[in-house]
Amino acid sequence: MGAISNKLRTVEGGSLAFYCPGCKGAHTIRIGDGAGPGWTYNGNADNPTFTPSVLVRTGHYCNPGQQPGDCACDYQERYPDEGPWPWPCGICHSFVTNGQIQFLSDCTHELAGQTVPLPDLPESVK
Ligand SMILES: [Zn+2]
Ligand SMILES: [Zn+2]
């Protein structure tokens, strides 16, 4: 387990992790067939391509149709002394193609609709 390039690392169970500059955190995807969702990988650790798209939902977005509440969105309201919850609710939907990460317009973060080079993994994620 560990970094296989500046951009990818392997994770136990046949998964790969890359750093998402939209979520400012790692996304992990499982490569190949088997139980649950799996992705294909072009085998190029420097310029990876994954198919299909990577869709990550966090917080209240995990349940389509759920309204914000009792989640990170109102955490500070409920616990004014504790500051904001560090992992905000969100949607991240991207295509990783040839070392570029294309964010679709349904992302809730600031890189929605943009395509950026896949960044190097920060030391904390390697
Ligand atoms: Zn993301
Ligand atoms: Zn929320």
Image (cartoon, rainbow, N blue to C red):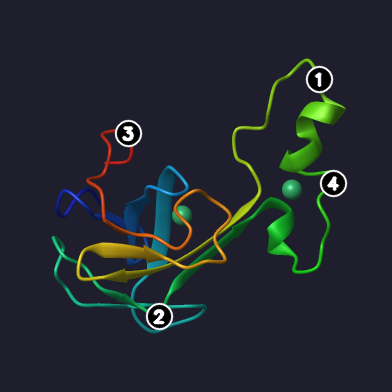
Nearer-N-terminus badge (3/2) = 2
> Image point 32% across, 54% down: which residue?
18
Instruction: Name the secondary structure under disc 3.
Output: loop
Q: Disc 4 versus disc 1: distance between alpha carbons?
A: 15 Å
Instruction: Name the secondary structure under disc 1.
Output: loop
Q: Position of residue 93 (x, y in %)?
A: 49, 66
Q: Nearer the viewer, mark 1 or mark 3?
A: 1
**Disc 2 residue type?**
Pro
When asked about the image quadrant of residue 13, the answer is bottom left
Nearer-N-terminus badge (4/1) = 4
Q: Disc 3 versus disc 2: distance between alpha carbons?
A: 27 Å
User: Can you tell which mark lies on residue 124?
Assistant: 3
Q: Nearer the viewer, mark 4 or mark 3?
A: 4
**Disc 4 residue type?**
Gly
Q: Position of residue 72 (x, y in %)?
A: 72, 40
Nearer-N-terminus badge (4/2) = 2
Mark 4, ligand 2, within 8 Å: the answer is yes
